[in-house]
Image (cartoon, rainbow, N blue to C red):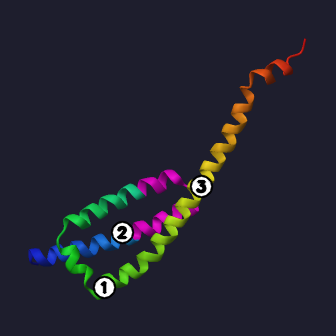
């Protein structure tokens, strides 16, 4: 196998790995397993870096095979983005609720009124 053919195979493998990681990201965010989700996102970022570093990625992008992979990836990415934003908003709301209760417990006047003499 020539070096160019091997590089094209690597470009194809990178795109397929990106698809697989995207499917796994969606699965773990649905399970609310954020630690695993973040680890998979880190791995997917590494794959993107490899894709950008490989010149044959742009050549592979022009193929029908890559277009088919992109057609599968695009809706997954949109779902991941929507669910990640939703999780982040819910998390912020929960943190704000917890903080509001914490602030009430530090009210010095409230502590004075709650004392028993």
Residue at 69% across / 43% down in the picture?
97
Provide the residue designation for mark 1: 65
Residue marked by disc 3:
89
In this view, the residue in front, 18 or 94, is: 94
Residue 79 image point, x, y percent: 52, 70
- Residue 11 location in percent, x, y? 24, 73
Does 70 appear above or below 112?
Answer: below
Q: Residue at x 11, y 76 (%)?
A: 4
Q: Is residue 114 left or right of residue 17?
A: right
Q: From the viewer's side, name the closer residue of 112 and 79.
A: 112
What is the number of the mark on residue 18? 2
Please state the extent of the stretch shown in magenta in the rendering.
20-40
Farthest-out residue, right: 117
Residue beneath the point at 39% across and 72% down? 19
Q: Name the element at disc 2.
A: helix
Magenta stretch containing residue 24, yes or no? yes
Q: Secondary structure at mark 3?
A: helix
Which quadrant is the C terminus positioned in? top right
* Residue farthest to the left, as pictured: 2
């Amino acid at each position: 196998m020539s070096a160019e053919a091997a590089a094209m195979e690597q470009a194809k493998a990178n795109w397929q790995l990106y698809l697989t990681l995207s499917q796994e990201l969606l699965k773990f965010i649905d399970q609310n397993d954020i630690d695993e989700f973040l680890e998979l996102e880190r791995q997917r970022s590494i794959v993107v870096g490899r894709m950008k570093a490989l010149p044959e990625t742009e050549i592979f992008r022009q193929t029908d095979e890559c277009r088919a992979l992109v057609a599968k990836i695009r809706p997954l990415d949109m779902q991941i983005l929507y669910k990640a934003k939703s999780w982040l908003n819910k998390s912020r709301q929960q943190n704000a609720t917890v903080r509001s209760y914490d602030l009430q417990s530090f009210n010095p006047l409230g502590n004075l009124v709650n004392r028993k003499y």
